[in-house]
Image (cartoon, grey):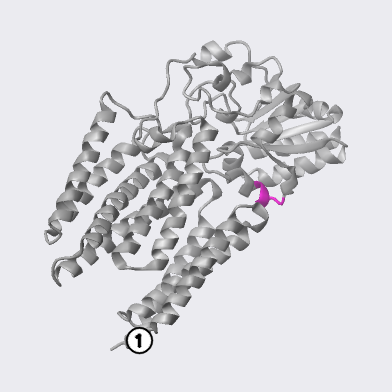
Amino acid sequence: MLETARQLPEWLTQLTYLVASVLFIVGLKGLSHPRTAVRGNFIGALGMFLAVVVTLLDRGIISYEVIFAGIVVGSALGAILAAKVPMTAIPQLVALFNGFGGIASVLVAGGSLLEATGKGVPEVDFTVATAATGLIGAVTFWGSLIAFAKLQELISDKFLTFSGQQYLNGVVLVAALVASGLLISDPTNELYFWILVGISSLLGVFLVTPIGGADMPVVIALLNSYSGMAAAATGFVLGNSVLIISGSLVGASGIILTRIMCKAMNRSLTNVLFGVMAAGGETASADEVYGGKVKSTSAAEVAMLLETAERVVIVPGYGMAVAQAQHAVRDLCDEIQSHGASVEFAIHPVAGRMPGHMNVLLAEAEIPYEQLKEMDAINPSFEQTDVVIVIGANDVVNPLARTDPGSPIAGMPILNVDKARTVVVIKRSLSPGFAGIPNPLFAADNCLMLFGDGKAAVLELIAAVQES
């Protein structure tokens, strides 16, 4: 029979929780800058490792062997995921992590309720925390599964709306609150908890279903916040201070990130919270926008443009990530600079499918951080830019955001690449981006389309520049 781990002294447990909490905060601070992000991630992981191990030892409910086996299995799964999941699938992975956090909170709260009712009538504060965990955790789990299915293209990523959807969301929310009230008034009836979880699961599905297209990064950030709030509520259920602190940090940072994303997308935070992100009105068809106006080019012609350019800006997008072209882009950047031109990278806050997606990709290719410019910093300089090279980006450079109030992306701040002297767009075809609308930039007088796979096109361009 395996030996059960002995309980630690209370002072040692609380001291370790304090150290873990400090490590979480220092880790989050490190994640705020690309130069310190790796170290910040390690520090945060160390804090979580300490918190988990001390909690298991403190509770004294399982053996050392089981604790060690859990660490080994968890570490192995994490290492496999880190090695196998491509950068383009990180948003899906984050969605699953959010969902796992939500369902774990629900199951822990449900188990704690069963344990508590076996000993008598639970205190009101315990029951309130349990109800909050059931509601938020279930919304997080099912909302995250829907987000994963949309990002993985298992279901349509378009806006799935129907008449009266907002009212239905309201009715389901009220039903969840009523179930919470019943649980709080009679905590010995565990059935109320599972009814609450069932209703909240519907709410999670209904809240995320109407969101799609370019708005998916926003909902991922919001679900990340929800998972943190569910964990914090579970901390109150268990009376675990480090879980309250870590959950609060994730919940607060997630909602701040969501606010930043909403500002970048010109969306209302209230609308995101209640899943009412409208798809916008009618827009022109692709034939109306592109018909007879699109000019294709070749790598040799672009190389001639670059030969005389003094200032070049590269705009990376999701297509570059899919093509794994970041290393080729770095080589292109080096080649252009060797000819005397300056090169900068314009980063839109929601380029790709997650905040910071492009920064990570470019850092992976060892492109100096000083060359990465945020949207607000680089937008005023496009009029003085000789050549802009757009690689696999679409919605974040679509001028319809400025010119068409009926567009699904109306009002969304964009990179004003259309104001540069010449724009070269590297893209497989004229297919639309996440928003599903045509891009008038591709038909503009100063725009040339270099059709092809992102990586192959960049490699051809490098060869052409070297020969010029």
Badge 1 element: loop
Where 373 sits versus 36, above or below?
A: above
Say what amino acid the circle numbered 1 marks: Arg
What x and y, as percent, mark residue 343? Answer: 78, 37
In the image, residue 262 lies at what x, y percent?
A: 49, 35
Residue occupying the point 25% across, 60% down? 125
Residue 238 spot, x, y in % from top left:
30, 67
Foreground: 48 or 214?
Answer: 48
Up-down: is 349 above or below 226?
A: above
- How far from the left and from the top, in percent, is residue 439? 57, 21
Based on the picture, tell me whether residue 40 belongs to the magenta stretch: no
Q: Residue at x 66, y 47 (%)?
A: 362
- How many C-alpha atoms fall within 10 Å of the one at disc 1: few (<14), some, or many (≥20)? some
Q: Can residue 279 be seen here?
A: yes
At 52% from the left edge and 63% from the top edge, which residue is drawn? 24
Mark 1 lies on residue: 6
The stretch of residues the image draws in magenta is: 362-366
